[in-house]
Amino acid sequence: MMAFPISESTPMSYPGPLPSDTDVVVIGGGVIGVCTALFLARKGRRVVLLEKGRIAGEQSSRNWGWIRQQGRDPHELPIMIEANRLWMELASQTNVDIGLVRSGVTYLAHDTKEFDSFAAWLPIARAQGVDTELLDRAALAQRFPELAKGGYAGALTTPSDMRAEPWVAVPALAGIAVRDGAVIVEDCAARGLDMEGGRITGVMTERGRIGCSEVVVAGGAWSSLFLRAHGVDIPQLSVRASVGATDPVALPHQGAAAGKGFAFRTRADGGASLAAGGSHEFFIGPDAVRALPKYGAYLKANPLGTKLLPASPKGYPDAWSTKRRWAADAASPFEAMRVLNPRPNVKRLKRVARSVATLFPEVGPIQYRALWAGMIDVMPDVVPVVDRVAAVPGLTIGTGMSGHGFGIGPGMGRVLADLVCGDAPGHDLSRFRLSRFSDGSAMDLGPAL
Ligand SMILES: Cc1cc2nc3c(=O)[nH]c(=O)nc-3n(C[C@H](O)[C@H](O)[C@H](O)COP(=O)(O)OP(=O)(O)OC[C@H]3O[C@@H](n4cnc5c(N)ncnc54)[C@H](O)[C@@H]3O)c2cc1C
């Protein structure tokens, strides 16, 4: 088996040094932090991005690389449509081939109930001018005969959806950010905010203090641990999702597609990435126990989609033994886990390979060349927090992308940069407000498509 391309032994591209001060510190070098830093630099701000491990070491390289509008929450969709345009612009601004292809995304309905749930999303697409189509059984057979062999009730498909190669794309975006003036420092965990008179004056890191008046927390699965230490509570949890990369294989369907129990996409190297769509594993820890009451609607909507596992492994954000408080001059949980690299669920991935081989018997048995997993950070309503924190002037949150942050990353980065600068973000962000978890709002579940 080949090793996953980014790990803590990957040589650093941005070793530092840490500047003594800046305008904005961005915490987290995933797609959200990288894009935020990129657009802040383009707005003329001095920006320093801190990454505890390697750029894109966690979710942002481990994902499927789907850049999809299909199935999004109506409030995310305008930002995602913008992100689609930004992906194309950014791809042309780097000299790296990020594998951006407009190959479409297709969801296969295994029964009429699921087909009807797909149909319910169509008006959302139409209202915002997205080219999504609902295909009934006969239309599916005509449009994608290779998929129709699975006996599906129909499909939802969006031809303008895209894909890219995550572990190439996000480091390439970081390259653009640096070219445009951002400073990135890897192997540099942010331990906490330095506050004076209720305002941010800097960030305490494992390499010392950096002065700044604005901070963006884009720490993926670690965001709630960081924020809680400053009295900001978000009910963010994370679930494990496994992926397998096959040897080169000529899948008859070239776009990205998902059906019951599987999802696949072709990669630029000729192999395919396979995963068990719609199901994941959830390790129980103290944050989970605390946040559980908010997750009622989430669990009810997909009761079999989440498998509960007894305890988070040591060092994970929600492990029972993970410290919730630490001093700024002592090691924090962030640097204790440079790159969160969960063990993949091999049994499940074998099942996925069998499902895909059954759908496409002409390709023969499917062999994996690499297996990996990522911890997806989730929110109870499956939409992120993108907001300024009223109680901590200077603090902005961009996290909780809930399993679909890769595609929307450039759009969210542009929005976050505007929020930090006090400029109009151009989209209604009320759906993503922080206060929805404390003002008595019911959790309004986004489309789980
Ligand atoms: C298996 C899998 C499949 C997925 N498929 C898709 C898909 O096809 N399409 C899609 O749109 N999305 C997909 N996603 C979701 C997507 O990958 C995430 O939503 C997105 O990458 C989140 O980006 P992020 O920047 O918020 O977080 P991350 O990529 O997790 O980055 C956060 C970074 O912050 C760093 N960090 C945390 N705390 C600190 C600190 N205190 N100091 C310094 N650094 C810190 C971490 O080391 C990490 O690198 C998938 C995710 C997984 C795991």
Image (cartoon, rainbow, N blue to C red):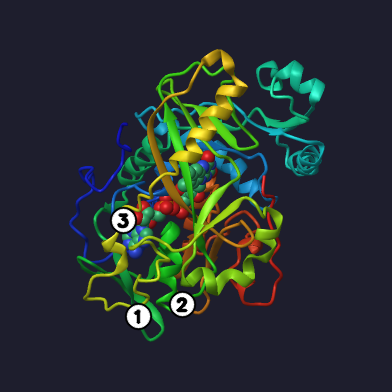
Neighbor class of circle 2 (other Cα within 10 Å; few <14, some 14-19, many 20+) is: some
Q: Position of residue 156 (x, y in %)?
A: 72, 33
| Beta carbon at label 3 within 8 Å of ligand 1 | yes
Query: How far across and down, in percent of the image, does residue 100 sit?
Result: 48, 29
- Above or below, 150 against 291 in this view is above
**Does residue 267 appear left or right of residue 155 in this picture?**
left
Does residue 362 appear anywhere in the picture? Answer: yes
Amino acid type assigned to the residue bearing label 3 in the image: Glu
In what quadrant of the picture does the C terminus appear? top right
**Of the image marks 3 and 2, the number of the one nearer the N terminus:** 3
- Marks 1 and 2, how far apart at CA: 9 Å
Q: Nearer the viewer, residue 47 or 151?
A: 151
Furthest-bottom residue in this view:
197
Quadrant, the N terminus: top left
* Quarter where residue 247 is shown: top left
Q: Position of residue 135 (x, y in %)?
A: 78, 27
Q: CA distance from mark 3 to mark 1?
A: 21 Å
Circle 3 residues within 10 Å: few <14, some 14–19, many ≥20: many
Provide the residue designation for mark 3.
Answer: 51
Please indicate whether residue 59 sits to the left or right of residue 178 in the image: right
Question: Circle 1 sits on which residue?
Answer: 195
Q: Is residue 397 above or below residue 7?
A: below
Type of residue at label 2? Val
Which residue lies under the disc numbered 2?
Answer: 392
Distance CA(mark 3)–CA(mark 2): 22 Å
**Along the polypeptide, which appears first: circle 1 or circle 2?**
1
Give the residue at x 70% y 59%: 300
Q: Is residue 341 above or below residue 444?
A: above
* Residue at position x 22%, y 61% in the image: 19
Residue type marked 1: Met
Residue placed most toward the observer, 301 or 158: 301
User: Is 20 displayed left or right of 162 in the figure?
Assistant: left
